[in-house]
Amino acid sequence: MDAIKVKNLSKEYRLGVISARTLSEEITNGISAFMNWNKGKKKQQAINHLNTSDKSGKVMALRDINFSVKSGEILGIIGKNGAGKSTLLKLLSRVTSPTNGTVIINGKISSLLEVGTGFHPELTGKENVYLNGAILGMKKKDIEKKLDKIIEFSGIKKYINTPAKRYSSGMRVRLGFAVAAHLDSDIILIDEVLAVGDAIFQRLCVEKILELVNDGRTILFVSHNMTLISQLCTKTILLNKGKIEQYGNTKDVIRKYMYDDFKKSSAYKKWDKGISNIGVEELKILEAYIKNNDNEVTDALQNNQPFKIIIKYRLLQPMEICHVGILINTIEGIEVFDGYETDNENLCDHKDIGIYETNCLVPENLLNEGKYFISIYSGIAGVKQFAKLENALSFQIIRLEDKGSELLINRKPRGIIRPQLIWSREISSN
């Protein structure tokens, strides 16, 4: 049975206009939807809208979206920022109304759309658990049965009676995921929030997601983390400019997404005015490039030679322990390794205003042949991120056979890394 079926779904935003309906119509529609949801019955819940209005100044966030999700399935949703991923989940969870199209839902939905969504800032963590349970139509005694498990999973027992407005983003994500995963919902929508949690919490979330699917729950998972998408999802949707560009086997969809990126990327990038996250004025990335062992800028690198990744950035105010780093992915989206200049203790120093150039030397015989991306990050660990440039650079490793390998016909090293292992042998007498 389909847990979700979407037909010809579109969402249009008009500049300067919040909604095509009046406020009273929105309130009436919202109350009606809430009452149907709150009954707690596994009925088909349908949304069907068609707004006719002036088409000038419109922005189509989604256009003619069609797909279905089976009960007990994990569907991945990927795409660039602005592709329509978050808008789609907001439509499914009734945070906003579609311009036209139909959504048929079998069961109750809980959602974790963004940090803090669904939490009242003035209520304590515990009170927010009860609030979310009530929205799902659960009785107080049923929520109480699961309260201890929710608090334990979240790992914030010490702060459970503290108002949510005092929680860090990580604490809100922990509690939000714990609530969504443990309350009586049949369908769970997750939008990139796991990126806020630490590695241990991410692992716990992945294990919990797999457990929920084994119990027959349905999950829609939006993420930029291709490793998680490939690990969790059997099917994936690739959104591009509000349309479905590809829908099907996760491996095939990720490969198309990453190959399209690879064709647009290169071994050299320059930003004349500098680039950073929106609103960041402390640091700007100016330039990034790859050099081979002959000091040439190139995207074709030999496996048996080292290469350098150079990042030039401007610091606009004095800073303590500010870091710049890289993450290398395969073209399939698998994370290979990351590293930061502050991994070198000598670079964990005070920095004055100025232009800096940081170099990362990648040793020879580390990566196997194939195509790779380099993402660039900068910030203060656990405090603030200055820049996040995903797949900023790309390169290809070309494998050159050594003398020993030539003796092995058609031998192709397996795996992502290809270290030069040190072998030895002794002859022992009988």
Image (cartoon, helix red, strand yellow):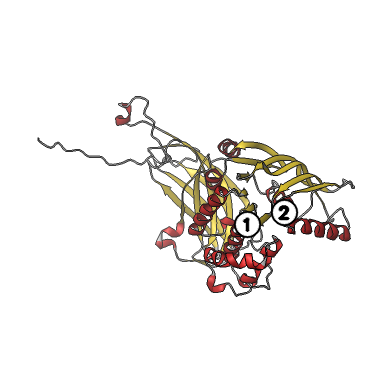
| Residue 231 in the image, given as x and y percentages of width and height | 52, 45
Write down the quadrant of residue 378 in the picture.
bottom right
- Number of the label disc, if any, that sits on residue 259: none
Write down the quadrant of residue 38 in the picture.
bottom right
**Foreground label between 2 and 1:** 2
Three-letter amino acid code at the position of disc 1: Asn
- Number of the label disc, if any, that sits on residue 41: 2
Three-letter amino acid code at the position of disc 2: Lys
Q: Is residue 346 above or below residue 393?
A: below
Sort mark 2 into few (<14), some (14-19) or many (20+) by Cα contacts within 10 Å: few
Q: Earlier in the sequence, mark 2 or mark 1?
A: 2
Residue farthest toward the left in the current orientation of the protein: 430
- Picture residue at 66% right of the left edge, 49% below the top: 81
Q: Quadrant of the N terminus?
A: top right
Q: Quadrant of the C terminus?
A: top left
Write down the quadrant of residue 313 in the picture.
bottom right
The answer to whether residue 206 of the structure is visible from this angle is yes
Q: Is residue 144 above or below residue 355?
A: below
Element on which disc 1 rests: loop
The answer to whether residue 284 of the structure is visible from this angle is no
- Number of the label disc, if any, that sits on residue 277: 1
Nearest the camera: 171 or 293? 171
Nearest the camera: 272 or 192? 192
Sort mark 1 into few (<14), some (14-19) or many (20+) by Cα contacts within 10 Å: some
Q: Is residue 382 left or right of residue 302?
A: right
Element on which disc 2 rests: loop
- Picture residue at 37% right of the left edge, 37% below the top: 304
| Residue 39 in the image, given as x and y percentages of width and height | 74, 58
